[in-house]
Amino acid sequence: ARAKLIKWISAEGRSQALLARSIGVSAPAVFAWVKGQYRPTQLVREAIEALTAIPAGDWYLPEERAEFKATMGRIRKGA
């Protein structure tokens, strides 16, 4: 997700500040995501998805993705 975010910011003269203003976070928060120091919260991930079309789930760590898939599997089986 970080690479996709960097690509989105780089396109068409966008900036980290523009992203921050558009989704209601601070510019230092966006800087931290771009540098890989932090990840956005789930709510902010959804806002990023709405603005950029980067899926919120792309921010999951591998272990989070595995747990999500396992949970969805249990739900589908009715457990």
Image: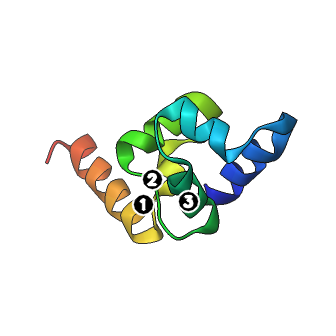
**Residue in the foreground of this view, choosing between 49 and 79:** 49
How far apart marks 1 and 3 lie (CA) works out to 19 Å
Expressed as whole percent of the image width and height from the top left, the position of residue 39 reads: 47, 60
Q: In the rendered image, which residue does mark 2 sit on? A: 40
Graded by Cα atoms within 10 Å as few (under 14), some (14 to 19) or many (20 or more), the crowding at tag 3 reads: some
Secondary structure of residue under mark 1: helix
**Which residue sits at x=52%, y=71%?**
37
Q: In the rendered image, which residue does mark 1 sit on? A: 65
Graded by Cα atoms within 10 Å as few (under 14), some (14 to 19) or many (20 or more), the crowding at tag 1 reads: some
- Which kind of residue does numbered mark 1 sit on? Arg
**Residue in the foreground of this view, choosing between 77 and 49:** 49
How far apart marks 2 and 3 lie (CA) works out to 7 Å
The answer to whether residue 53 shows anywhere in this view is: no
Sequence-wise first label, 2 or 3: 3
Secondary structure of residue under mark 2: loop
Q: Is residue 72 above or below residue 12?
A: below
Q: Is residue 57 above or below residue 63?
A: above
- Which kind of residue does numbered mark 3 sit on? Trp
Looking at the image, residue 36 sits to the left or right of residue 45; the answer is right
Do tag 2 and tag 3 residues touch (Cβ < 8 Å)? yes
* Image color mode: rainbow
The residue mark sitting in front, 2 or 1, is 2
Q: In the rendered image, which residue does mark 3 sit on? A: 33
**Which residue sits at x=22%, y=44%?**
75
